[in-house]
Image (cartoon, rainbow, N blue to C red):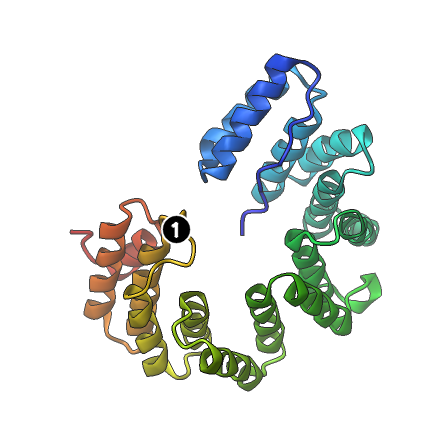
């Protein structure tokens, strides 16, 4: 998953650089990540101390696995304002990548810095879902000797649920599946659908759960088909219907029906011609895009 997220403000040393940062952030908001990465690189070429450019370029370096570059860039951003939650998050992300890819004897130190920075980010901006999600992932995935703690992970899921109930359900689902307890994940979606049977977001996540577990596939299929008849939960999400068709294709694959799967993947591409998950799925199955 891409760690980049557009910033709400653009700290810059002059109006021209500020305008460039704002434009680059707009590219992030639009999901144009290649163009955004290029834009931030251009900013740093003439304004190497721009905190927001260092922050965003550092997250791109994290996604590329370039931990040394990420640490350098995020370190500059953090030094400009240690009380900016975004920069703490960026510093945590860089140290997290370093803990995974760095030298054997330095992994422990990087991991501890990662956790400390994520905690500080959540303290500074306690309603930011991204920061709680980062902490949840850390607590769930890290070994105990560097702070991994499943109880703490569940605590973060609860915090997420207080802010956004649907994302809270997704967080608990992640943890239940990690502990191989799919029945608990299904239980929370069964309850949610009884209360809101035509909630497209809940229907989609229920269908996704059937794909992840390869259980209750017929019900998942019905949920996705219902999604196609409902408005998108977010009117600005241009990939919604493409994603629904892609997930229907996933179910057909689980059912060992490649022709039907390809038909759904092609339907996804009719909704959005550059929808990469459907393109990749078709390539894997050897199906035509037309």
* Residue at mark 1: 235
> Which residue is drawn at the image coordinates 46% and 70% (left, top)?
202
Height in image: 203 above or below 83?
below
- Graded by Cα atoms within 10 Å as few (under 14), some (14 to 19) or many (20 or more), the crowding at tag 1 reads few
Of residues 89 and 62, the one nearer the viewer is 89
Residue 239 locus on image (x, y percent): 36, 51
- 276 vs 77, left or right, is left
- 211 vs 71, left or right, is left
Instruction: Return the residue found at the far front.
Output: 195
Of residues 165 and 210, the one nearer the viewer is 165
Rendered image quadrant of residue 175: bottom right
Height in image: 34 above or below 101?
above
Height in image: 226 above or below 185?
above
Height in image: 227 above or below 276?
below
- From where the camera sits, is residue 258 visible? yes
> Which residue is drawn at the image coordinates 76% and 74% (left, top)?
151
Q: How many marks?
A: 1
Residue 189 locus on image (x, y percent): 50, 78
- From where the camera sits, is residue 253 visible? no
> Which residue is drawn at the image coordinates 44% and 36% (left, top)?
32
The secondary element bearing badge 1 is classed as loop
Rendered image quadrant of residue 153: bottom right
Of residues 68 and 140, the one nearer the viewer is 140
Residue 128 locus on image (x, y percent): 68, 51
- 29 vs 103, left or right, is left
Instruction: Return the residue found at the far left.
Output: 290
Residue 99 locus on image (x, y percent): 73, 51
């Amino acid at each position: 998953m891409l760690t980049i997220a557009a910033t709400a403000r653009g700290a810059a040393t002059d109006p021209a650089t500020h305008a460039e940062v704002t434009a680059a952030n707009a590219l992030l908001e639009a999901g144009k990540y290649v163009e955004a990465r290029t834009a931030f690189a251009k900013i740093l070429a003439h304004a190497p101390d721009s905190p927001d450019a260092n922050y965003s370029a550092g997250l791109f370096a994290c996604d590329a696995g370039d931990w040394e570059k990420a640490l350098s860039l995020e370190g500059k951003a953090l030094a400009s304002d240690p009380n900016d939650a975004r920069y703490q998050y960026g510093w945590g992300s860089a140290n997290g990548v370093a803990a995974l890819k760095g030298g054997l004897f330095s992994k422990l130190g990087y991991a501890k810095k990662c956790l400390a920075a994520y905690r500080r980010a959540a303290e500074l901006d306690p309603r930011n879902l991204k920061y709680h999600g980062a902490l949840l992932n850390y607590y769930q995935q890290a070994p105990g000797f560097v702070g991994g703690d499943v109880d703490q992970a569940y605590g973060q899921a609860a915090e997420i649920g207080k802010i956004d109930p649907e994302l809270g359900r997704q967080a608990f689902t992640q943890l239940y599946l990690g502990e191989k307890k799919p029945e608990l994940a299904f239980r929370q979606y069964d309850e949610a659908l009884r209360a809101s049977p035509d909630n497209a977001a809940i229907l989609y996540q229920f269908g996704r759960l059937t794909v992840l577990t390869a259980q209750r596939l017929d019900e998942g299929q019905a949920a996705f088909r219902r999604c196609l008849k409902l408005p998108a939960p977010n009117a600005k999400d241009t990939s919604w219907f493409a994603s629904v068709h892609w997930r229907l294709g996933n179910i057909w694959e689980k059912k060992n029906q490649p022709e039907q799967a390809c038909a759904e993947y092609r339907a996804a591409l009719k909704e959005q011609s550059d929808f990469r998950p459907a393109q990749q799925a078709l390539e894997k199955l050897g199906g035509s895009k037309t």
